[in-house]
Each structure stands twice: as C-alpha cells, then as structure tokens.
Image: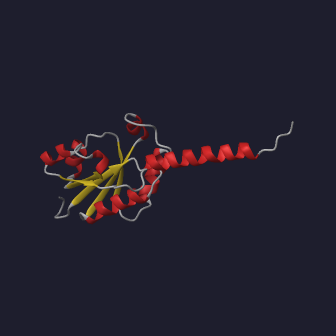
Amino acid sequence: MFKGKTIVYTSGTFDLFHYNHLRMINYARALGDILIVGVSTDELVSSYKAKPAIPFDERMQIIEALKTPDLVIPQHTLDHTETVKKLNIDAFVVGDDWFGKYDYLKNLGVEVFYFPYGMGVSTSNLKKSIHDSYAETLLHQQKAKPDLK
C-alpha cells in the first residue's frame, strides 16, 4: 500500500493479445487503486516455452495503449519477490494456468488471485487454430491448381 492506495500487479506474456488477457487485466484493475502490469521479455518467455509471435517491444506498446494500467513494466523473471517489495504490491493476479505457483507471495503479505480463464481463448489455442487453418488453406490451394501436364 502506498499513501492509502491498494497496488495490484498482474503480469503475463500477452502474446497475440486476446479477450481473456483483457478480462484478466480488467479484473486486476477492479481489485485496487493502482494497477501495474508486467510484460514478460522474449528472453524470459523463451526460458520456459516457445518464443512469442509478437516481439516484446510491440507487446509492451499494446499493453501501454490500454486505459486500465497505471504503469507497464518489463518482467525479467518469474520470481516476483523483488517486484513485490520494490513496488509495495498488495495483490497479485495471474491466470489460473499458474495455479499454486505464486502462493509464496502470501508470505510477503500479498493477496494472490488466480484468474479463471475457463475454456475460453488462449494464445496456445489461437496459435493452433491459425496453424490448422493455414494448413487447410494450403491443402485446398494445392487441390485447386489445374494439372498442366
């Protein structure tokens, strides 16, 4: 807390920004007075999964363009201990695909909220859908070409 204001932190890769990203950020905004959003760097993301499709600088600009965050910062690590201490974070919000991973923050006096994505959109699902759709398009294009023999 800073000057009586509740500070909320949420973070993510925010690759192929979609509706569930927006829902989580808006949920985090509703929990406090000041919202800080961390955007994972390409190097951080690449340390635990495939490199994002959208470069870090562009993902930062997308989040900065939203009206809900008060501050957007780069996220270089999945350990949020220092961020919580340096920025006086009161609450932390992350998608429920990380359930239990950030419970250690409770020992620092931080309320941890795992936002339920449910069965909705995810970046992984979007990438698969785009890939499958493109593969099908290529297959149809090959079948549609006339035989010039």
Left/right placement of residue 50 relative to residue 30 reads right
Quarter holding the C terminus? top right
Q: Residue at x 46, y 56 (%)?
A: 62
**Which residue lies most toward the right here?**
149
Quadrant of the image occupied by residue 48: top left
Q: Looking at this view, is 38 or 87 the one in front?
A: 38
For residue 70, say whether it is visible.
Answer: no
Quadrant of the image occupied by residue 142: top right
Q: Looking at this view, is 149 or 27 the one in front?
A: 149
Measured as percent of width and height from the top left, residue 57 is found at 47, 47
Q: Looking at this view, is 99 or 54 the one in front?
A: 99
Measured as percent of width and height from the top left, residue 139 is found at 66, 43
Q: Residue at x 12, y 45 (%)?
A: 107
What color scheme is it? Answer: secondary structure
**Which residue lies most toward the top here?**
47
How many marks are shown on the rendered structure?
0
Q: Residue at x 26, y 40 (%)?
A: 79
Quarter holding the N terminus? bottom left
Q: Looking at this view, is 61 or 51 the one in front?
A: 51
Q: Residue at x 27, y 62 (%)?
A: 34
For residue 67, say whether it is visible.
Answer: yes
Measured as percent of width and height from the top left, residue 125 is found at 45, 48
In the rendered image of this protein, does residue 27 appear above or below residue 42? Answer: below
Left/right placement of residue 59 relative to residue 32 reads right
Measured as percent of width and height from the top left, residue 98 is found at 29, 45
